[in-house]
Amino acid sequence: MTALPDGVARHDFDGTTSIATRGHPEYGEATDGEWRRWDPNRSKLGAMLALGMDTGLENGQKTLYLGAAAGTTVSHVADFGGPTYAVEFAPRPARDLLDVADHRENLFPLLKDARKPETYAHVVEPVDVVVQDVATRGQARVAALNRRFLDGDGRLLAAVKARSEDVTADPEAVFADVVAELEEHYEVLETEPLDPYHDDHLGVVARPLE
């Protein structure tokens, strides 16, 4: 199984082994001392790690997180990462995200639209990782627009939601179309369905084309 980044570990919680980070609990997750369970059923990136995908994540990396919602996953990323920019468009979850950031001085919430990176380009520095978890049509386009922030050997870690692209289409066909569009801007390194944690989702690891 692919090694986990420093700061992420497999930890026992009352007889159940799960990936975990050290930090302030945020969403009712199980805890054991300073460790908090990273629930892969509530986190697509957590599912990618639990499934053994080679995400390339490392301790201290700069991250741009697209679709941060209320901060469930990005809280774990900030636990072991460096500066973490969290983009969320909806005001209600963004308020919860602000509460999460209160406990993490390296987490910077941005009430912005991931489809309009020019609105936060003046704030976000070049990053090592773009994590994308957006429930919108045109997910490959969002990844293409935000490629500008990635260092040359950076990574895109995307959770592609088939139902957000087309609720009536076969998910496998949707995934093929999205990956093909991604390949216009990225070298796709790995793909993996996120079953059994998230139905009709595809995990993608990619790096920008030169």
Image (cartoon, grey):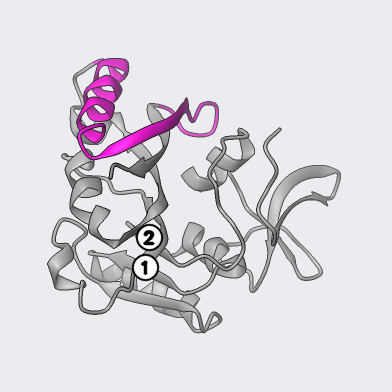
Location of residue 55 with respect to 100 vertically, above or below = above
Of residues 108 and 136, the one nearer the viewer is 108
Disc 2 residue type?
Tyr
Q: The magenta stretch spans which residues?
A: 170-199
Identify residue for label 2. 65
Magenta segment includes 196: yes
Residue found at x 35% / y 75%? 109
Marker count (numbered): 2
- Residue 124, image x and y in percent? 30, 73
Indicate the secondary structure of the residue bearing disc 2. Answer: strand
- Identified by mark 1, the residue type is Ala
Asked if 159 appears above or below 28 in the picture, the reply is above
Q: Residue at x 29, y 65 (%)?
A: 88
Please state the horizontal and vertical placement of residue 69, each as a whole percent of the image. Answer: 36, 60
Q: Which residue is mark 1?
A: 86
CA separation in Å, label 2 and label 1: 5 Å
Q: Are marks 2 and 1 in contact (CB under 8 Å)?
A: yes
Q: Residues within 10 Å of mark 1 (few under 14, many from 20)?
A: many
Residue nearest the viewer, comparing 158 with 197:
158
Residue drawn at x 57%, y 38% as measured from the top left: 54
Query: Magenta segment: does it hold 18?
Result: no
Q: If you read the primary sequence from the N terminus, does the residue marked by circle 2 or circle 1 appear first?
A: 2
Q: Is residue 170 left or right of residue 75?
A: left
Indicate the position of residue 118 as horizontal and vertical percent values. Answer: 13, 68
Q: Taking the image as drawn, is residue 23 in sight?
A: yes
Name above or below for residue 50 compared with residue 163.
below
- Residue 148 vs residue 204, the one in the foreground: 148
